[in-house]
Amino acid sequence: MQSKIISVCKLKNKLNHIFFKTLLIVVFVCMLFFAKAQSNVNAIPIVEKYVVSYNDVTRMKFMNDDQLYNEGWQSLPQPQFWQKIMLLSPDSAMISVAGTRQILNKIALCDWNKMTETEHNFYKESLRCANGVCESSDVLVTIGKKDFYDYKKAMPIINRSIDVFKQNGVDPWYAQAILLIESPGKMNTKSGVGANGPFQLMKAVAKKEGLIVNGKIDERTNVEKSAMGAARLLKTICIPYTKMILDSAHLVYNETDLWFRLLVLHSYHAGAGNVAGVIKKINPSEGGMALIQQVWQTTWGGFRNASQNYSQLALAAFCNFDELVMQQKDSVYLIDGDRMYNSYCTCKYAPFDECSYLGNCIKSYQSDLLAGSIPFDYFAAKVKAVQTQLSGIAPAQSPYTDEHFNDIGFQLLRARKMDMAYKVFKLNETTYPGSWSVYHGLGQTCLMMGQKTQALEYYRKSIKLNPDNADGAKAISQLTRK
C-alpha cells in the first residue's frame, strides 16, 4: 500500500513538473509573440537611398510613412494648399478661404502690391461672389515659400538626426517632420522669439535638455546636439503629456497612429498646455483624422493660426519630400537636370518627343543653376552636352535662343549673383556674338559690379547692334554725364 502511495506521489510530482514546464514554455512563447507584435507596432518606416549631387554620392536615411496615403491625409484641402505654397516662388501668392483653404486664385505679388486697401477688399469680394463663398468667411493672401522650403539642403540633417533620435529611443518620424518645416537646411536661424537651430529650440528648453547656450557657444546650431535636445524634449514632455491629455479625454490611441503623431507635433510647437485646452474645448468622443481637422479650426490661449497650421505643414512637407525622394527606386538626384538626362540616356523616344524632352532637360539645368544647386561651369558643360545630343537629332532645331540664356542672366542679376550672371552672358556672347541683348546684359552686370568703363563699352556695342535700345541709350547717357 505504501509503495502505491509513493508511486502516486511520484506520478503527481512528475505531472506537476510537466505542467509547470509546459506553462513556462507557453509563457515564453507568448512573450516572444508579444515582443514581435510590439516590434511590428513600433516598426519605423525608414528607407535608405543614394543621394547624388553634382560632385558626390552619399547613402542617406529618410522616413516614408504609408499611413499618410493609406488613410487619405494627402487628399485633404489644407495639406494640398500648403503643398502648392511650398512649391510657389515668393513673387506670387495664393488667395484662399481661411477655414477650408479653398484656393480662389493665384496672383503675381507685384500686381497685388500695386492695389490699394479698397481695391484689395473689392478683389476679395469679387472672388467670394465668383466662388460662392459666404461673406463671413475670411479670405487670406499667402505668399509663395519655395525659397524657404529647401528640402534638398535638409536631407543631410535629416539623415544625421534619424540616428540621434533612434539612440535616444524616440520615433525618428518626428525628426524628419520637424526638420522639414521649422528651418529646412538652415543651421543658424533665429526666430523672432529667440528659437534657434534646425529644431528651433528655445534657449531655456535647450539648456534644460543639456545643451550649452551662452554668449560664446550655442549648441542649438549643432545638428547632433540640437537633435538630442529635441528628442529629449519629445520623450520627456511632448509625448507623455499628449498621452495624458488623451487619457484624460478617454480617447483610444496608438503611439504610431499618424493623428497621434500630429498632435505631438502641436505639443512641440504650441506647448502641451495649449493643446490640452484645445482638446478640452473640442471635447471629442474619439481620435483620428476628424479630431485633427477640428484642431485646425479651434483656438485656445496661445493656440492660434500658426499653431493650427503646424501639422498641416508637416503633412504637406512629407508629401512634397516623398515626391522628391521616391522618384527613383534606389537614388535621389539633387540635380533635376541630371535626373532627366540620365533617364534619357536609358530610354529612347520618338524624334519629336526626344527634342522636347531634351529641351526640358536644359530648362531643368537652368532651374538647378538659379537655385544654386550647381556651379556655372557644371551648368555650361551639361547644356553643351544636351545641345550636342540635340544637334544630332534635329540640327535646325534649338530649344534655347540667345534670349533664353539672357533671361537666366537677368534672373541671376535680380538675385544679386553678379559673377555667375557675367559668366552666363559671356557664354552667350560666344554663342550669339550678334545679339544686342547679350551686350546689354553684360553692360548691366558690369554696372552693378562697379565696372563703369566696361559697362559703357558693352552698352555701346548693344546700341550699335540695336539703335532702338532705349534702356541702353539711357544708361550711356548717365555714364557719360559729367
Image (spheres, rainbow, N blue to C red):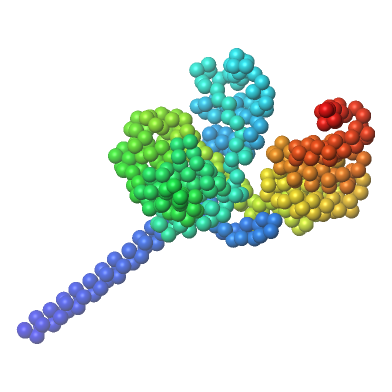
Question: Is 163 placed above or below 251 here?
Answer: below
* Left or right: 74 in relation to 3: right
- On the rendered image, what quadrant is the N terminus found in? bottom left
* Residue 267, image x, y percentages: 40, 41
In this orientation, which residue lies closer to the viewer: 66 or 160?
160
Question: Is 469 placed above or below 122 here?
Answer: below
* Residue 393, image x, y percentages: 88, 51
Q: Please state the total of marks drawn on the protein image.
A: 0
Question: Is 425 placed above or below 162 here?
Answer: above
* Residue 313, image x, y percentages: 52, 39
* Residue 329, image x, y percentages: 63, 57
Tell me if I can see residue 315 in this picture: no
Q: Residue at x 51, y 20 (%)?
A: 137
Tell me if I can see residue 56 in this picture: yes
What is the quadrant of residue 249 in the picture?
A: top left
Give the residue furthest to the bottom.
3
Q: Residue at x 65, y 18 (%)?
A: 115
Give the residue furthest to the left.
1
* Left or right: 26 in relation to 1: right
* Left or right: 142 in relation to 307: right
What is the quadrant of residue 170 in the picture?
A: bottom left
In this orientation, which residue lies closer to the viewer: 9 or 289?
289
In this orientation, which residue lies closer to the viewer: 153 or 359?
153
Question: Is 26 placed above or below 368 here?
Answer: below
Q: Residue at x 49, y 39 (%)?
A: 191
Q: Residue at x 41, y 52 (%)?
A: 212
- On the rendered image, what quadrant is the C terminus found in? top right
